Image (tube, coloured by chain):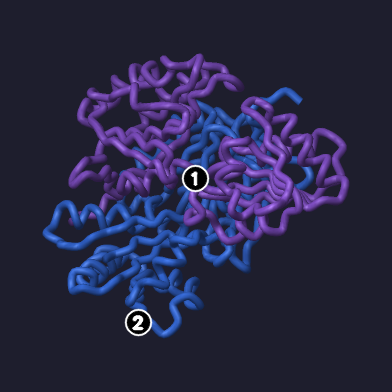
Chain colours: A purple, B blue
Amino acid sequence: MLYVVGIGPGGLDMMTYQAREAIEAAEVIVGYKTYTHLVKELVGDKPVIKTGMCKEIERCQTALELAQSGKTVAIISSGDSGVYGMAGLILEMVTKQKWDVEVKVIPGMTASIAAGSVLGAPLMHDFCHISLSDLLTPWELIEKRIINAAEADFVICFYNPRSRGREGHLKRAFELMAPFKNPNTPVGIVKEAGRRKEEKWIMPFEEMDFELVDMRTLVVVGNQSTYFDQGMMITPRGYSL
Amino acid sequence: MLYVVGIGPGGLDMMTYQAREAIEAAEVIVGYKTYTHLVKELVGDKPVIKTGMCKEIERCQTALELAQSGKTVAIISSGDSGVYGMAGLILEMVTKQKWDVEVKVIPGMTASIAAGSVLGAPLMHDFCHISLSDLLTPWELIEKRIINAAEADFVICFYNPRSRGREGHLKRAFELMAPFKNPNTPVGIVKEAGRRKEEKWIMPFEEMDFELVDMRTLVVVGNQSTYFDQGMMITPRGYSL
């Protein structure tokens, strides 16, 4: 049995009961080294196989081999396993290669939802997720999605907003959104949402501080109705008060 | 203290620890009647104030009054409290009216994430949420969002896909998406995700069965790469296998 577990943003309090149970039921844990650290109090003395960044295929292969050999295995993703996580690759390998493994996807709280609660209530109306990583996606398609989402006034959550080799992507995204965004549109920045070192900032679109953003950060850009008050970023649902 | 709690899709196993703790800490629970039922085993003998559909403002007012009078209150939303839930309205009332209440937003697993895990891994690439309810949003804006999202090849999750008075909205949404969608694009339908009566269907875009959909259903329309195999709907992240 292979559990593909979304552990949520990191703290145990934002983990679901079934995620915890899957990790407790597993005989072996497989994950990216930063994330295995987040669940170490659940793991105890069990073997943990840690792999580095960009080793996703090897990581999934290891998990599938262990599960096929009869072990109960949990491969973990931060956030939700099904949102830019390991569930897709595991199920791609199961459907395209010859594996005899039973897989169960255990969902978790993805970063946008966790960050939204930290900021207030920015995701109360239609919103979208865009990853700014072009490792696996053509940059032209990412640009098209940014423009279309801004034009249709979605609240936009940027995943992977910055990392080595793509310092300029978020700035370019803001240039693309600028024709559609009021300069005062609130932008929320949450670093390490749901973890001990959590930090947040809310600022107007035109004053965006790109230097605050790193790979562990989620950026939320409001829609035309989103406002900032009492330290919170709020997108009205449309009720008349 | 007022906790605005996202209880997840319904079953306790998809609830987070902090959501459970907030409900246990509360002296009074406030919620829409269907949702208070879902958490009754956590609530025990505590008073539960249930209100009907479309009574959101009254519900929030009741919760704020109780909290202002000194009670510890939990107002609950199914899914995430911040995604088409109660967090936005509560924080709007707090910022626009004179309430002296401390509010804490407790996020939960929203329907798209829960439904995604039931279907396989359809949300592995950029995706968006669109509510088809035009009670609070002009239908023209909803149409624009559908068109822009389909043109930019987002995976699209439809909330509130059907209810009395808007039987035709989902069908119209499919007409709007049709120019951009391959007829074989998988569409996932999940009814009551994460609850005992959970049901799912996956079918090609051109064979969409609108009769399966009701208000407790989430509809996920894939992108150009999404495929159906072994009973699962999978959107590749882009790795070369």
Question: Eyeballing the image, is A140 above or below A30?
Answer: above
Residue B55 point in image, percent of width and height: 30, 67
Relative to A8, B98 lies left or right = left
- Amino acid type at mark 1: Pro
Q: Do the residues labelled 2 and 1 touch (CB within 8 Å)?
A: no
Please give the name of the residue rendered at 68% of the width and 32% of the height, measured from the top-left corner.
A51
In the rendered image, which quarter is residue A134 located in? Answer: top right
Please give the name of the residue rendered at 70% of the width and 35% of the height, measured from the top-left corner.
A89
Given the image, what chain letter belongs to the residue carrying mark 1?
A
Please give the name of the residue rendered at 57% of the width and 53% of the height, measured from the top-left corner.
B114
Return the residue found at the far bottom.
B45
- Amino acid type at mark 2: Pro
In the rendered image, which quarter is residue B45 located in? Answer: bottom left
Please give the name of the residue rendered at 22% of the width and 67% of the height, measured from the top-left corner.
B64
Residue A99 point in image, percent of width and height: 85, 40
Q: Which label is found at residue A9?
A: 1
Mark 1, other Cα within 10 Å: few <14 / some 14–19 / many ≥20: many
